[in-house]
Image (tube, helix red, strand yellow):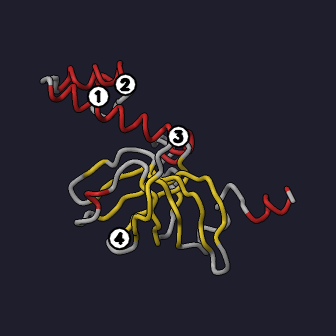
Amino acid sequence: LLIRLKLNYPDKISGQINRTEYYLCKIINQPDRRSGTVKVLLRIISYKDSISWYKCKTNIQAYFQKDNKTGSLSCGNIIIIKSKLQEFNNLKNPCEFDYKRFMEHRGIKYRSFIKTGTWETIGQYNGLNIFAVKLRNKLLGLYRKYGIKDKEFAVLSAFTLGYRDELNPEIKQ
C-alpha cells in the first residue's frame, strides 16, 4: 500500500509539467499587487493529467494578470488554475547572478503567468501559518495607523515581524 501511494502521489511534478495544465493550489503569502500583475507564492496541492488528480507539495511563483477578480486574492485562498509551469532559466553569462539556484534555495522551482479567466477561487484554508500571516498584516496596519512610515517602518517591521519587503537594498546589506 505504501509503494502504491508513492507511485500515485509523487511529491514532485518535474516529469509532469509538460503534460499538466490544471493545478489545485493554496496561496501561502500575502499577494504583492503591482501595476499589471499580482505576484503570489502558491503551493500546489494536486495536479491533474489526462486521467486523474495527483497529490503534490511544490511551491511556484505565480503572476496573475490583473483584473477585477485579483483584488480578492488573499493568503489562504484555495484556487484552481489552468496554466503551464516554467522552470527558472539557467545562467546565460558566467558571472551572472544565479536566480534559478536562488529560487530553489527558497523552495521554489517553477513560475507561471496566469491569464484572466484561467483561475477560480474555490475555498479558504485557515491553518496556523495563514493565521500568522494575517496577524502580521494587522500589526503592519497598526504601524501605519500610528504614523510609522518609510525607513522607520521598514526597519521596525523587519526587526519585530520579519517583514523585509519594505527594506531597501542598502539596509538589507
Quadrant location of the N terminus in the rendered image: bottom right
Rounded to the nearest angstrom, the CA distance separating label 2 from label 4 is 33 Å
Q: Dot 2 corresponds to which residue?
A: 161
Quarter of the image containing the C terminus?
Answer: top left
Q: Residues within 10 Å of mark 1 (few under 14, many from 20)?
A: some
> Which picture quadrant has residue 14?
bottom right
- Spatial CA span between label 4 and label 1: 32 Å
What residue did someone put label 4 on?
115
Q: Amino acid at mark 4?
A: Lys
Q: Position of residue 62 (x, y in %)?
A: 42, 57
Name above or below for residue 90 compared with residue 117: above
Label 3 sits on residue: 106
Distance from Cα at disc 1 to Cα at disc 2:
8 Å
Q: Position of residue 125 (x, y in %)?
A: 47, 51
Camera-side mark, 2 or 4 = 2
Q: Determine crowd level at label 2: few under 14, some 14-19, many 20+ residues with C-alpha closer than 10 A.
A: some
First reached walking from the N terminus: tag 4 or tag 1: 4
Amino acid type at circle 1 is Leu
Q: From mark 4 to mark 3, how far is it between C-alphas?
A: 25 Å
Instruction: Please tell me the numbered disc located at residue 62.
Output: none
Residue depicted at x 51% and y 64%: 85
Task: Answer with left or right where residue 16 lies relative to residue 41.
Answer: right
In percent of width and height, residue 59 lies at: 53, 51
Considering depth in this image, is 109 or 77 the residue closer to the camera? 77
The tag earlier along the polypeptide, 1 or 2, is 1
Q: Which tag, 4 or 3, sits closer to the chain's start?
A: 3
Q: Nearer the viewer, mark 2 or mark 3?
A: 2
